[in-house]
Image (cartoon, helix red, strand yellow):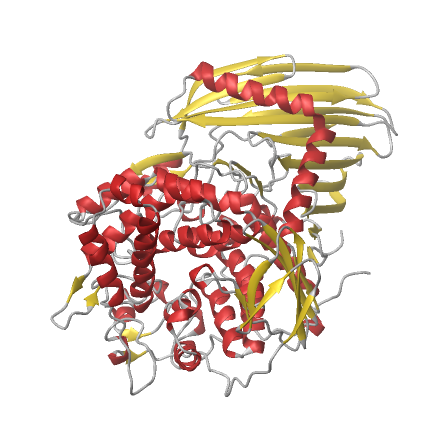
């Protein structure tokens, strides 16, 4: 059959041809989710497959954390996302020969992820080893509007002769999976993690209920079917502990077809009984059947129409980048749309990478996107953080601190990181959460959320910083012994990013307490405590080297030896896999943007000249061994005027998963890097900043692009920004006028377009990167344009 690979198109991701070796990474890219249920993009026939996966947000198994030698304060238990009951499976036998893409001949095969319909479709023409030909068309969705529901349309058509077709539609629990974890305890926890509690089948529907062995979480999966054939059909259904199967046998004439619509429902709970869970999924199935397949498609399209009206980014001049940015936005939506009371994991629900844990990535990368495009999803993610407040306060107390110490990595809110330097010592996660709260409040004015959740998050994280830091003999407030975003510099003193974010956190807590004295009283905040927060913020120590004219990433960083990039084998990146950490910790080598991230998120603390000098200095030392880095570097490169470099970094962030830049997409796609694509376009070339709740823009385009247009939501107003080479045009799409700034000048945006000129900038000499670590030079002229 013809060659395979992704095709370039503006509103879809299409893979043509069958490449078994690429299944794992395409299954991640083709994953469907609504933030509650996640289905990896495996073939309906279940084999061949790369890595099967069906996930429920927050559903995990517990296991002991391994230590060669334990220490006080080390977390004792880990959490790992569980591959739950697989309902995607519909096997097909053609005159008793199983449809298996490894056998026979596939004369045509393509799969399409449609960003506007919210479905994954597949068309296959297959000839069995004995020459019997069929065409199989499938379409699946995970509903944005009915969060417990997924559905599959499976259609088979004989191409040459009358054929006997047998379809087997399964619910399968405890699917055998080859785990690539090196920890035998984790592997053991994931081997048959589900214990059967109940199974039942009748007519066309079935339900299985299971419980995890250690964490004790219960989940139910149910299926129902609508069968459409031209003539008689014979069916049989049965259920056992780990399998429920509906078998459909039918003789289909040439020109006829067998069509099966499979409805799936999932639910889980730590407390509800088996009958209650069964009732929940039965009700969800009843709702899905009532809506019907066409109704589910219509609801899905309407939901996405509304999302794109608020969120779309149009890029004129680079077809592949346009596709990649919409791919990014679609997956960010899938990760957060219906997560509601649960976390947004680093891989979303697209794979088992990072054990399904959520990190600071959520607040610092994903939530800024959702805050300005789908603010309800940002609010719900922050409500999840608030729901784990008791665990964060217990963790702080265990560490001898006040307030709330939120975890480096977790599923249920308890710390799961067994690695101290880059785990517990990375206290900045608490300030990142506070920053996300302040950004959300500034963008929405949501006082109800502030009173219910936001104020307490700000207060308890401020208490953490007040107890973690101290005033030195000169009166400066220091925060010592922490790890910033750069994990190649651990347990350092006065990390500039951490100190700046802590300062913002402290100011934010004072702000909310002064606005709501009753809340301050509720949380026991008195005048002396408020004064202590103000003083700590105002005297926060920010190290600076006047000789070099740059800020050290952390105190003493500029005194470290330089890394020998010239003699580092290109095959030895990422460095953490080939060099001891002690060597990384004592050198000026940066895994990912750290001080540069501070230039972006806390840009109001630096002058333009400081930004330019700092960016150039750290460009020469940042190796980007993390997918988090390129998006941030794109933003700051654009701000200081290095537009070609910003364009290169934006493409790297946006194409991280589609090009499998880090060779690990098989375990799920990178949510923070996808968010970095939005940041590179909107905060980079759009120049969006929101310091202090004021929205400002400083747009500029690289010469390779003709135009970028993006849409945002702020304070209930939807508006659009269109940028070309010479000017930017702002106008309101729906809602009230807004006060904004364009390159420092205040103006009012209304329904009538406002056009403003873009001033030129002289960036000076381009910065250099470590030898061999430059981003790939982007040349849009070599990328195929869309068929028009």
Asked whether, in this view, residue 14 is left or right of residue 254, the answer is left
Asked whether, in this view, residue 590 is left or right of residue 198, the answer is left
- Along the viewing direction, whichever of 687 and 749 lies nearer the viewer: 749
Asked whether, in this view, residue 572 is left or right of residue 63, the answer is right
Image vertical order of residue 720 relative to residue 380, above or below = below
Query: From this viewpoint, which residue is outermost toward the left?
Result: 473
Residue 122 location, x and y as percent? 71, 41
Asked whether, in this view, residue 650 is left or right of residue 549, the answer is right
Image vertical order of residue 489 relative to residue 440, above or below = below
Residue 521, by quadrant, is top left
Image vertical order of residue 580 relative to residue 515, above or below = below
Residue 561 location, x and y as percent? 27, 80
**Quadrant containing the C terminus in the rendered view:** bottom right
Residue 600 location, x and y as percent? 44, 68
Q: Residue at x 71, y 61 (%)?
A: 752
Residue 599 location, x and y as percent? 41, 70
Q: Residue at x 68, y 54 (%)?
A: 733
Q: Residue at x 61, y 58 (%)?
A: 325
Query: From this viewpoint, which residue is outermost toward the top?
Result: 202
- Along the viewing direction, whichever of 531 and 614 lies nearer the viewer: 531
- Along the viewing direction, whichever of 706 and 513 lies nearer the viewer: 513
- Along the viewing direction, whichever of 517 and 787 lies nearer the viewer: 517
Specify whether residue 350 is in view. no
């Amino acid at each position: 059959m013809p060659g395979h690979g992704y095709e370039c198109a503006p509103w879809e991701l299409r893979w043509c041809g069958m490449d078994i070796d690429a299944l794992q990474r395409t299954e991640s890219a083709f994953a469907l989710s609504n933030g509650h249920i996640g289905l990896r993009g495996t073939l309906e026939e279940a084999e061949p497959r790369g890595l099967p996966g069906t996930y429920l947000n927050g559903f995990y198994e517990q296991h002991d954390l391994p230590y060669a030698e334990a220490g006080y304060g080390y977390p004792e238990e880990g959490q790992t996302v569980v591959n739950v009951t697989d309902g995607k499976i519909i096997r097909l036998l053609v005159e008793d020969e199983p449809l298996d893409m490894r056998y026979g001949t596939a004369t045509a095969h393509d799969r399409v992820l449609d960003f506007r319909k919210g479905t994954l479709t597949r068309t296959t023409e297959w000839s069995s080893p004995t020459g019997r030909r069929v065409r199989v068309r499938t379409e699946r969705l995970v509903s944005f509007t009915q969060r417990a529901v997924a559905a599959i349309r499976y259609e088979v058509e004989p191409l040459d002769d009358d054929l006997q077709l047998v379809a087997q539609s399964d619910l399968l629990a405890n699917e055998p999976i080859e785990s690539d974890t090196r920890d035998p305890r984790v592997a053991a926890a994931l081997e048959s993690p589900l214990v059967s509690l109940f199974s039942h089948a009748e007519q066309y529907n079935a339900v299985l209920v299971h419980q995890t062995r250690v964490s004790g979480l219960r989940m139910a999966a149910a299926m129902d079917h609508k069968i459409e054939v031209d003539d008689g059909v014979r069916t049989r259904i049965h259920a056992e502990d780990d399998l429920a199967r509906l078998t459909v046998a039918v003789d289909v004439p040439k020109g006829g077809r067998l069509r099966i619509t499979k409805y799936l429902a999932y639910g889980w709970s730590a407390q509800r009984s088996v009958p209650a869970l069964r009732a929940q999924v039965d009700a969800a199935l009843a709702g899905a059947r009532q809506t019907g397949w066409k109704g589910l498609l219509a609801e899905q399209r309407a939901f996405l129409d509304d999302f794109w009206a608020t969120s779309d980014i149009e890029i004129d001049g680079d077809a592949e980048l346009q596709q990649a940015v919409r791919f990014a936005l679609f997956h960010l939506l899938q990760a957060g749309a219906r997560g509601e009371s649960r976390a947004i994991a680093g891989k979303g629900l697209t794979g088992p990478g990072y054990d399904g844990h959520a990190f600071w990535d959520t607040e610092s990368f994903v939530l800024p996107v959702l805050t300005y495009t789908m603010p309800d999803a940002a609010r719900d993610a922050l409500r999840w953080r608030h729901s784990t407040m008791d665990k964060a306060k217990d963790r702080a107390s265990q560490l001898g601190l006040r307030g709330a110490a939120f975890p480096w990595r977790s599923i249920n809110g308890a710390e799961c990181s067994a690695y101290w330097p880059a785990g517990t010592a990375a206290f900045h996660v608490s300030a990142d959460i506070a920053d996300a709260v302040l950004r959300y409040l500034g963008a929405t004015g949501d006082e109800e959320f502030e009173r219910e959740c936001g104020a307490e998050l700000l207060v308890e994280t401020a208490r953490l910083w007040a107890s973690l830091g101290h005033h030195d003999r000169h009166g400066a407030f220091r925060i010592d012994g922490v790890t910033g975003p750069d994990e190649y510099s651990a347990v350092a003193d006065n990390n500039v990013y951490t100190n700046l974010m802590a300062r913002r956190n402290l100011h934010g807590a004072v702000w909310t307490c002064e606005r709501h004295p009753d809340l301050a009283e509720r949380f026991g905040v008195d005048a002396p405590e408020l004064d202590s927060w103000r003083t700590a913020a105002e005297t926060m120590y920010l190290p600076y080297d006047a000789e070099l004219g740059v800020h050290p990433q952390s105190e003493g960083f500029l005194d470290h030896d330089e890394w020998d990039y010239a003699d580092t084998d290109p095959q030895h990146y990422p460095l953490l896999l080939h060099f001891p950490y002690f060597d990384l910790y004592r050198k000026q080598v940066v895994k990912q943007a750290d001080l540069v991230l501070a230039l972006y998120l806390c840009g109001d603390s630096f002058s333009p000249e400081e930004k330019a000098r700092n960016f150039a200095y750290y460009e020469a030392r940042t190796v980007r061994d993390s997918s988090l880095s390129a998006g941030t570097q794109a933003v700051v490169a654009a701000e200081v005027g290095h537009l070609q470099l910003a364009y290169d970094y934006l493409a790297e962030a946006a194409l991280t998963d589609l090009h499998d830049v880090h060779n690990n997409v098989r375990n799920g796609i990178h949510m923070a890097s996808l968010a970095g694509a939005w940041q590179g376009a909107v905060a980079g070339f759009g120049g969006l900043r929101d310091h202090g709740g004021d929205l400002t823009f400083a747009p500029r385009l690289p010469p390779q692009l003709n135009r970028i247009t993006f849409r945002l939501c702020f304070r209930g107003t939807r508006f659009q920004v269109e940028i070309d080479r010479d000017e930017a045009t702002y106008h309101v799409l729906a809602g009230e006028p807004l006060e904004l700034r364009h390159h420092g000048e205040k103006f009012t945006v209304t329904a009538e377009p406002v056009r403003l000129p873009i001033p030129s900038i002289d960036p000076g000499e381009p910065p250099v990167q470590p030898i061999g670590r430059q981003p790939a030079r982007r040349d849009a002229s070599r990328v195929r344009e869309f068929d028009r």
